[in-house]
Amino acid sequence: MHIKPYFKKIDINDFTPHMHQEFINYLVNQRKSRNTILRIRNALYNAIKRVLINKTIVSNPCENVVMPKKEIDEKVKFLDSADNSLFF
């Protein structure tokens, strides 16, 4: 998975919301699909939630992380109906 190699050996008490946001941004920059990023984020959120339930930490640093919106590539061009004959 993507989580362990990125964070390596960070202590759970040192994990911050800023670090989580940087990780999400890293995945976006790696051009991972939104669905993949959501699954990774949810896996990390649920793992941290379990640590929170066990009272190892007092708050979940995965909360309030912003999922960046995918930017439209300027090079993408759409065909109009007049160009349909090129494909049919």
Image (cartoon, helix red, strand yellow):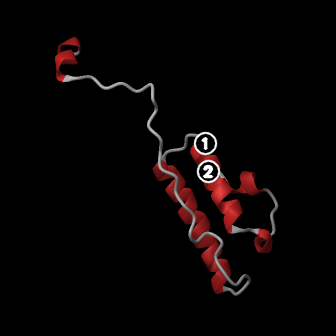
Quarter of the rendering containing residue 12:
bottom right
Seen at 81% across and 69% down, the residue is 11
Look at the picture and state if 5 lies above or below 18.
Answer: above
Q: Position of residue 5 (x, y in %)?
A: 74, 51
Foreground residue among 3 and 82? 82
Please, which residue is most extreme toward the top here? 86
Q: Which residue is mark 1?
A: 29
Distance of label 2 from label 1 (alpha carbons): 6 Å
* Residue 36 at x, y percent in the picture: 51, 51
Above or below, 9 against 5 in this view is below
Vertical comparison of 50 with 31: above or below: below
* Mark number displayed over residue 25: 2
**What amino acid does circle 1 point to?**
Asn
Indicate which disc residue 64 carries.
none
Residue appearing at x 61%, y 54% in the figure:
24
Q: Residue at x 64, y 52 (%)?
A: 1
Where on the picture, by quarter, is residue 61?
bottom right
Question: Alpha-carbon neighbours of circle 2 within 10 Å: few (<14), some, or many (≥20)?
Answer: some
User: What element does badge 1 sit on?
Assistant: helix
- Give x and y (percent) for residue 86: 22, 12
**Closer to the camera in the image, 68 or 30:** 68
Q: Residues within 10 Å of mark 1 (few under 14, many from 20)?
A: few
> Are the residues at dot 2 and dot 1 in contact (C-beta closer than 8 Å)?
yes
- Residue extending furthest toward the front: 74
**Three-letter residue code for mark 2:** Asn
